[in-house]
């Protein structure tokens, strides 16, 4: 919101500098983003009369002008290159010694051999936004009204001595989209006396009102005022109105359009003017649009509507989109003589939806979207009629229509002094509170020394409860005036929940393995489940649809982290980053039948490519075994033992290269290579490996207790064991027998080789283990080690049919 200080001064006395006022408003909750000094660099510019225009003798595109400014500066010879300069025009003249924007100084100079004694200025040279300059003057000089006296200070005349406060309003303070309401705030923070414009209208009782208004959609239009103004003349607006509109960022057009914009800025109430004679039977109908109904709007574009949009119509057609834009068929033109002035209250949410769907945002729709003051709608219409009578010569029809089906309900709130003081941290009396609230025109009735009944003015629709009133009191009292106190109370040591502790352990473990954490959206595209080749009846398709998604890419809530991780990989691959090792700790969402979904904490890991280990080490592939090693590292950090059980048929994983992860026979996750069909859907060529673990299940299994064992002081004995096993026998079965058979003397063992090839029968594999024996009580003899070693061999042969190599 752009606020002209010159305009504000019409309504409230200001005795502070713009900087001090901006600081006071900001501290009171009306944030001033920037301060603009419109013509701070400009000086010595005056209104001049072009007495004569001749062709420059030495240039085809230059004119030689004779200009009078005042008695002191007469018959000035000025060279001008503007194509629109004409004899008899009133123009802005920069005299020798004048300053313009960007430090330009005007001096007497020769242009093509002819002396120029000043400069005739264009709007751009005076810093006026091109969009605010009349179209016929954008490529030339600025032409003023003929009635402006010569010698007038053009800086003041054009409002270039004005200061603009650019407000950054919070959504709840839409009332300050009005100059009058900003003036109220200024008066409250400065103590200045407020005076509002007096609205008096010459009413013509000899002209009958011919307009009728019928509101069919009363839920979308709660009040509609229509006034008729006859015999108006379309003219340019007076300069004072033009400069106020320009200062507010609105381009002047003509007196009728400018008056509706002026009242909207002044009072915060958007208005619309219809050509009275083009409205069929002068009958206005406020209704929902018909599905597929077409209206040509003021920008001469055809708009297709539906039945959730509100229109203003006559008996034949829609003539405006309510609160958004008027229709072309009833537009005010140069030939218009009679007007219908519309002032109404349209439903904010419906207006916002309509303007967004049609991509039509304007100053008017902005105000309707946030809600206008329903009680001041007739006053705004009267103000516009007053200005139309003064500036367009209009005759105001005495009778008018005020269709008000949904009356405003005055808001009263009980305010407790004790709660005010306890919340803010001050000690105010009821009389002090009354004085503060009456500054912004709140009605205060004191019932006793602790309680008041506050009547909320209709323009403050954001005040709905006692806490809102306390906020108003705090900002008017001044946040800087609230005493600073130290916080008190018992400070307890923060204790992390088990899930937070587990997430921290897992995160640290993964980072130590070289993984990078990513954070993705919980909303995904429903097509992701098709790309993952997840069957229609699979549990992962039991997702929650978003009622109002911003786009299709966020239409459902995820039930797996896999699609997000693949998207991260694909995005990196498209930027030629082929070595990816990422993880995410996030939530998935599944419906429960209740209001809120079940939120499950999950871990997802994706790896692909290789790791560069240095010039003398070569590369290490990021494959299934690397991911399995990461998983085992996670298990070790959580004092858990993960079992990897091969399993085919898991969604989106390769049927022969996938396993389910269990802890104490409880499934907690999956690991494997991405399915070839899924890779094809994502246009991936390289192998990709995935891990997903349910961290909520880990919470119940995690045991933070650690058992410490004595470090053996006696030497260890290492023995290798190579066996032949059938291909269909799982390594875990062999490891289980080795561990059980080794007893207390088997300190550790690990697999160091798997071989298939020559000398190995078909259908078999060779497994080589390294076994480490140690006693905590003595040095082991060969006989003692051989006894345990042979027992392990026999049990492997008996239980799995293993053959010793």
Image (cartoon, helix red, strand yellow):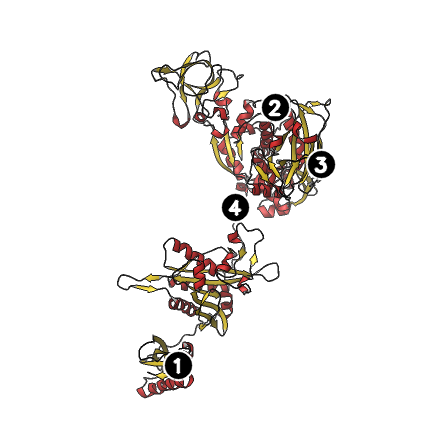
Q: Are marks 1 and 2 in contact (CB under 8 Å)?
A: no
Percent position of residue 418, x then y: 63, 47
Given this view, does label 2 or label 3 mark the residue nearer the observer?
2
Q: Nearer the viewer, mark 4 or mark 3?
A: 3
Specify the quadrant of the image occupied by residue 546: bottom right
The residue that disc 2 covers is 335
- Of labels 2 and 3, earlier in sequence is 3
Task: Answer with mark 1 or mark 2, whichever residue precedes in sequence.
Answer: 2
SS at badge 3: strand
- Residue, disc 4: 484
* Element assignment for label 1: helix
Q: SS for tag 2?
A: loop
The quarter of the picture where residue 260 lies is top right
Give coordinates of residue 119: x percent, y percent: 41, 19
Q: Which residue is mark 3?
A: 214
Separation (CA) of disc 1 from disc 2 = 103 Å
Q: Are marks 4 and 3 in contact (CB under 8 Å)?
A: no
Q: CA distance from mark 2 to mark 3?
A: 28 Å
Give the residue pinned by disc 1. 738
């Amino acid at each position: 919101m752009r606020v002209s200080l010159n305009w504000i001064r019409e309504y409230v006395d200001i005795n502070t500098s713009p900087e001090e006022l901006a600081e006071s408003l900001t501290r009171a909750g009306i944030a001033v983003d920037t301060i603009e000094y419109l013509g701070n660099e400009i000086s010595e510019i005056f209104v001049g009369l072009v007495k004569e225009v001749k062709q420059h003798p030495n240039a085809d595109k230059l004119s030689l002008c004779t200009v009078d400014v005042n008695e002191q500066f007469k018959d000035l010879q000025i060279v001008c290159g503007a194509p629109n300069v004409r004899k008899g025009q009133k123009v802005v003249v920069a005299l020798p010694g004048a300053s313009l924007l960007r430090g330009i100084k005007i001096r007497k100079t020769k242009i093509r051999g002819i002396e120029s004694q000043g400069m005739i200025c264009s709007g751009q040279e005076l810093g006026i936004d091109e969009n605010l300059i009349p179209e016929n003057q954008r490529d030339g000089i600025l032409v003023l009204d003929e009635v402006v006296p010569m010698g007038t200070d053009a800086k003041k005349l054009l409002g270039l001595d004005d200061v603009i406060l650019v407000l950054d309003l919070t959504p709840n303070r839409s009332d300050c989209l009005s100059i009058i309401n900003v003036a109220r705030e200024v008066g409250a923070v400065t103590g200045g006396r407020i005076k509002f414009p007096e609205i008096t209208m010459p009413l013509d009782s000899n002209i009958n009102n011919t307009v009728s208004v019928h509101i069919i959609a009363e839920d979308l239009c709660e009040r509609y005022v229509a006034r008729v103004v006859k015999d108006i003349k379309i003219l340019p607006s007076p300069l004072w109105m033009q400069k106020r509109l320009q200062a507010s960022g609105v381009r002047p057009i003509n007196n009728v359009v400018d008056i509706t914009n002026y009242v909207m800025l002044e009072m915060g109430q958007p208005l619309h003017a219809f050509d009275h004679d083009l409205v069929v039977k002068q009958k206005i109908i406020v209704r929902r649009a018909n599905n597929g109904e077409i209206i040509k709007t003021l920008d001469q574009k055809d708009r297709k509507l539906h039945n959730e949009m509100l229109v203003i119509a006559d008996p034949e057609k829609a003539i405006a989109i309510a609160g958004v834009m008027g229709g072309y068929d009833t537009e005010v033109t140069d030939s218009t003589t009679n007007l219908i002035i519309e002032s109404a209250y349209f439903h904010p949410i419906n207006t916002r939806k309509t303007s967004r769907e049609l991509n039509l945002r304007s100053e008017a729709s902005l105000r309707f979207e946030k809600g206008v003051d329903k009680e001041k709608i007739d006053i705004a219409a009267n103000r516009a009629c007053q200005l139309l009578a003064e500036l367009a010569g209009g005759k105001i029809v005495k009778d008018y229509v005020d269709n008000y089906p949904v009356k405003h309900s005055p808001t009263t709130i009980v305010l407790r002094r004790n709660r005010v003081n306890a919340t803010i941290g001050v000690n105010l009396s009821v009389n002090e509170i009354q004085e503060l609230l009456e500054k912004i025109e709140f009605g205060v009735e004191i019932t006793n020394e602790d309680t008041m009944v506050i009547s909320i003015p209709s323009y403050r629709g954001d005040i709905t409860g006692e806490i809102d009133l306390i906020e108003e009191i705090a900002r008017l009292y001044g946040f800087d005036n609230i005493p600073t106190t130290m916080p008190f109370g018992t400070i307890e040591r923060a204790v992390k929940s088990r899930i937070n502790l587990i997430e921290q352990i897992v995160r640290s473990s993964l980072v130590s393995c070289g993984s990078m954490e990513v954070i993705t959206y919980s909303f995904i595209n429903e097509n992701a489940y098709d790309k993952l080749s997840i069957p229609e009846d699979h549990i992962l398709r039991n997702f929650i649809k978003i009622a109002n998604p911003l786009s299709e890419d966020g239409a459902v809530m995820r039930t797996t982290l896999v699609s997000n991780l693949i998207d991260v990989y694909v995005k990196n691959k498209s930027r030629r980053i082929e070595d990816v090792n990422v993880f995410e700790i996030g939530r998935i969402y599944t419906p429960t039948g209740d209001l809120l979904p079940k939120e499950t904490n999950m871990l997802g890991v994706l790896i692909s490519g290789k790791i560069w280990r240095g010039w003398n080490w070569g590369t290490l592939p990021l494959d299934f075994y690397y991911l399995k090693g990461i998983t085992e590292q996670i298990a070790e950090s959580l004092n858990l033992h993960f079992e990897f059980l091969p399993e085919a048929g898991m969604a989106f994983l390769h049927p022969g290269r996938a396993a389910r992860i269990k802890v104490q026979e409880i499934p907690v996750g999956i690991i494997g290579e991405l399915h070839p069909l899924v890779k094809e859907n994502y246009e991936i060529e390289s192998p990709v490996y995935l891990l997903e673990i349910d961290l909520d299940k880990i919470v119940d299994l995690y045991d933070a207790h650690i058992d410490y064992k004595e470090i053996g002081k006696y030497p260890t004995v290492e023995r290798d064991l190579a066996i032949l096993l059938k291909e269909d026998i799982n390594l875990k079965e062999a490891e289980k027998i080795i561990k059980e058979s080794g007893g207390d003397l088997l300190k550790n063992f690990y697999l160091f080789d798997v071989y298939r090839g020559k000398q190995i029968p078909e259908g078999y594999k060779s497994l080589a283990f390294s076994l480490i024996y140690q006693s905590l009580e003595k040095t082991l003899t060969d006989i003692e080690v051989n006894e345990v070693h042979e027992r392990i061999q026999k049990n492997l042969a008996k239980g799995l049919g293993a053959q010793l190599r």
